Image (tube, rainbow, N blue to C red):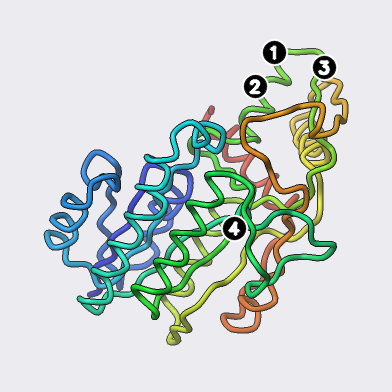
Amino acid sequence: MKKVLVTGAKGQLGSEIKELAANYSDFDFVFTDISDFPLDNTEEIIANFHRVQPDVVINCAAYTAVDKAEQDPITADAINHLAIATLASLCRESGAKLVHVSTDYVFDGTSPIAYKEDDMPNPKSVYGLTKLAGEVACAKNCPESIIIRTAWVYSEFGNNFVKTMLRLMTERDTLSVVNDQIGSPTYAADLAQVILTILGSKKWEPGIYHYSNEGEISWHDFAMDIKEIAQKSCEIKGISAASYPTPAERPAFSLLDKSKIKAVYGIVPVDYKTSLKIMMERLDKHGN
C-alpha cells in the first residue's frame, strides 16, 4: 500500500482530499498541517519527511494571504518557494512522487486568450513571485514532479469568496464587486478528485498542468450566481479593480487553458455553476 503524505490538510484543498480519501483504499493517507509539518522550517521538513517516509507527496500547503505577502515576503518565500525546493529534493532522493499545487498568479493577466502551461510567467505580486519560484525549484529538484496550476479556489471548508459573499449578502443591502477581472472558479472538491484520479491512474506524466472548472466570468458574475442560488435580495454593483485598490496586484485575466490535462489524463472539468450549486448545497446541509 502506497503511503501518501498530504501537507496543508486543514486548508480548502487538503480538507477536500481528506473527504475523498476513504474512496481510495489502495493508499495510506497521512494528513499533516502546520502544527505537525511546518513548511517554514527546513530542518522540520526533513525530519518529518523521514519520519513519514511517503511514496507520494501532495503539497496543498501554501502562504495564500495575497495582500499580506506584500509586507511579509520572507515568510511567503519560505513557505511557497524554499519549502518546495526542500520537499522536491527529498522526493527525488527517496523516489517519492510529488504533486505540487500552484496558481494563476504566476501570470500577469495581459493575455487575450486562456493561458497554456508553456506561456511565459510574469507575476505581479509577491505571492505570484514566490509561487513561481516554488514551481521552478520543484521542476529543477524533482523533474518527475507534477505541478497543477489552479485559480479562484473555494470550498465548504476554510475562508473563501463564496462564503464571504454569502455572509455579506446577509449583512448588507448592497455590495460592490470587481467586474473587470476575468477567470474561472475552482471548486476544491473537484481539484481534489482530479489529483486523486491522477494518483490512481496507471500513468505518471510529469510537468505542469492547468485545472479549473469550466467557464469564463468576472468576480461580479460569480457574486451574482451566488446571489441567485442562495436567493438573496442584496443589490450587487459592478466596479473596476482600479476603484478597489489592494496591496497586491491581481491578474486582470487569468483564464487557464485545460487542454493538456484533458488530453493526458482524460479529465473532464465540470461547469463552474454546477459545482457552485453542489458546494452551496453542502454548506446548507452542514449548517455552515
Question: Which residue appears at 68% of the width and 58% of the height?
Answer: 213
Which residue, given by chain and number where applicable, does mark 4 sit on? 150
Which sits earlier in the primary sequence, circle 2 or circle 3?
2
At label 3, counting other C-alpha atoms closer than 10 Å, the crowd grade (few under 14, some 14-19, many 20 or more) is few
Mark 2 or 3: the one toward you: 3
Which residue, given by chain and number where applicable, does mark 3 sit on? 174
At label 2, counting other C-alpha atoms closer than 10 Å, the crowd grade (few under 14, some 14-19, many 20 or more) is few
Q: Are marks 1 and 2 in contact (CB under 8 Å)?
A: yes
154 w.r.t. 45: above or below: above
Which disc is residue 128 wearing?
none
Which residue, given by chain and number where applicable, does mark 2 sit on? 167
Q: Are marks 3 and 4 in contact (CB under 8 Å)?
A: no
Mark 3 or 4: the one toward you: 4
Q: Measure the alpha-carbon separation of dots 2 and 3.
A: 12 Å
In terms of secondary structure, where does tag 2 sit?
Answer: helix
Q: Measure the alpha-carbon separation of dots 1 and 2.
A: 6 Å
State the count of labels: 4
Instruction: Provide residue 19's location: percent of width, then percent of height.
Output: 42, 51
Mark 4 or 2: the one toward you: 4
Q: Is residue 35 found left or right of 260 in the rendered image?
A: left
At label 1, counting other C-alpha atoms closer than 10 Å, the crowd grade (few under 14, some 14-19, many 20 or more) is few
* Amino acid type shown at disc 1: Glu
- Front residue (pair 270, 153): 153
In the picture, which quadrant includes the N terminus? Answer: bottom left
Question: Residue placed farthest to the bottom in the image?
Answer: 202
* Amino acid type shown at disc 3: Thr
Q: Measure the alpha-carbon separation of dots 4 and 1.
A: 30 Å
Which residue, given by chain and number where applicable, does mark 1 sit on? 171
